[in-house]
Amino acid sequence: MNQNQLFQRTRIRLALCYAVVMGLILTTCGFGLYTAIFHAHSIALDRELEFVANTLHNNLESKLEQPGKLTPIVKELLPNICLIKTNCISPKSSYQSHILNVLNQSYYVRLFDNSEYLIAIAGSLPQTKSSVLNKKRWETIEDDAGNFYHQISLSLHTKDNRDWGYLQVGRNIADVNSYMDAVKLSLVVGLPIAMMMVAGASWWLAGYSMRPIYQSYRQIQQFTADAAHELRTPLAATQATIDSALLMPDLDIKEAWDILATIKRQNQRLTSLVVDLLMLSRFDRKSISLAQELCCLNDIINDLIEEFAAMAISAKVMLKSEFHVHKDVNIVGNSEQLYRLFSNLIVNAIQYTLPSGKVTVILDICDSNAIIQVQDTGIGIPKNELSHIFDRFYRVNSDRSRHTGGSGLGLAIAKIIVLSHHGSLEVKSKVGQGSTFTVTLPVQDCDSELHIRLNNLYKFSKNI
Ligand code: ADP
């Protein structure tokens, strides 16, 4: 396949298309995965912050008395709270059992009075000089050191429901960001690796899916070459006969008859070859619509034994039939094709059997199948050739086959006739002992004739 430019180009195009489509799908999935993970983390972070802020908010509100004033009891709740006026630096060891500490040490709390002035702080605060309150409920900020924080702001009330000020609870989100960076990095590194694997797989898949097409392309090429070769032989023979006739100055009537007989023989060979080729191509295109009828196999076999009796006598071969059933065996099929099938097998059997040999056509029934065997005591077929003899133009021994007038299409045609009748064709052979070709065809029940008639009637009414 790699030597053929057309197939090579198609394979590259197919592999590229696969790779591009898969690449787009993978990139979309990667982006979707990143967004989903980010979304899940944001929601978890918001919930956590909201929980901490609400807990603190409810606890504080139950203790606050004067707007903008912190009661000493608040110290119990937030041990490390620091009033801005006192300019304190929060000692980290001083808060051991607080809710913020239990969760993690990246939390901070800020308290603003009603005039949005920062009055107290607690926890790991952002390194920023700005102490302005942003009243947005949710906010993500970046401090002067480049750290990111996520915070929530809630309004605070005193015990007697007067406005006290605002509570802001926030958290350093470096852990979330570093996790998301790790996800991003694995996607950025993983996607090109996945793309390379996809490209390799695409190349292999394109080759794999094109293999049957390439095989049938090769078969067609081989078939065309074989057909041309077979057609050339009789054409060349005719040409040579005509050329030699033209060279004869005084052609007498007997010589002219001989020449015409040669040309006629070659013409017949050509005609039968073209008919066979046409038939095969029609079967291939399934454009052949066979008239179906009830065919009696006993009659067909008897007719053929009679027809080929003279041929068998001249080949000094004994030709006979054996019916192992004592009733008529009927199948639905095309009688013309069935005659062709069995005559191909019988002619082969006679042609490939030496004088004083025997050819027997046996008819039997087994499991509602008609079994027809064409047995001969002929030259047989080597084991390694058995799988090829049904191939088009295949001949075991070309010289001998050509001598018998065979073109190597007989068994190929026999096979497709059997298949078109939903049957099977098998061969057993031993070199020097003979061959047995077994045809199995489904036998029809009593309703078949009625069925065929109704079918024909239906087709006829459709045509009107
Ligand atoms: P051909 O027209 O050359 O006989 P077929 O397709 O009928 O072509 O057969 C293919 C090949 O199978 C033949 O060339 C022949 O060598 C072999 N063959 C077919 N039938 C027999 C047989 N009964 N005994 C031995 N060889 C056979």
Image (cartoon, rainbow, N blue to C red):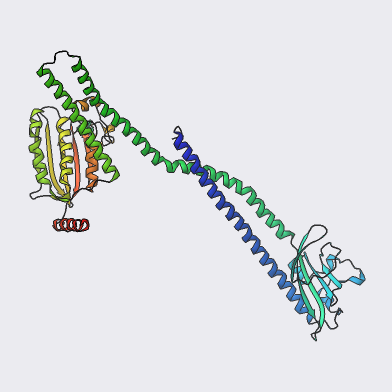
For this view, does 331 lie left or right of residue 65?
A: left
Q: What quarter of the picture does the C terminus occupy?
A: bottom left
Can residue 108 be seen here? yes
| Residue 284 spot, x, y in % from top left | 29, 42
- On screen, residue 372 versus residue 129, left or right, reads left
- Give x and y (percent) for residue 300: 11, 43
Residue at 7% from the left image edge and 49% from the top image edge:
326
Residue under the point 16% across and 53% down: 444
The quarter of the picture showing ligand 1: top left
- The residue furthest top is 249
| Residue furthest out toward the front | 249
The residue nearer to you, when weighing 309 against 271, is 271
Residue located 69% across and 57% down the image: 179
Q: Is residue 244 left or right of residue 140?
A: left
Vertical order, 130 against 438 (above or below): below
- Where is 409 relative to 297, above or below? above
Single out the residue that lies furthest toward the bottom. Answer: 160
The quarter of the image holding the N terminus is: top left
Decide which of 45, 82 is in the foreground and name it.
45
Q: Is residue 189 above or below residue 64?
A: above
Question: From this viewpoint, which residue is outermost toward the right?
Answer: 86
Q: Is residue 405 visible?
A: no
**In which quarter of the view is residue 399 placed?**
top left
* 21, 205: nearer the viewer: 21
Residue at the image point whose x is 63% and y is 51% from the top: 187
Up the image or down, 446 lies above or below 238; here it is: below
Q: How many numbered discs? A: 0
Q: In the image, residue 8 lies at what x, y percent? A: 47, 36
Left or right side of 53 for 358? left
Percent from the top left, x then y, of residue 412?
A: 25, 38
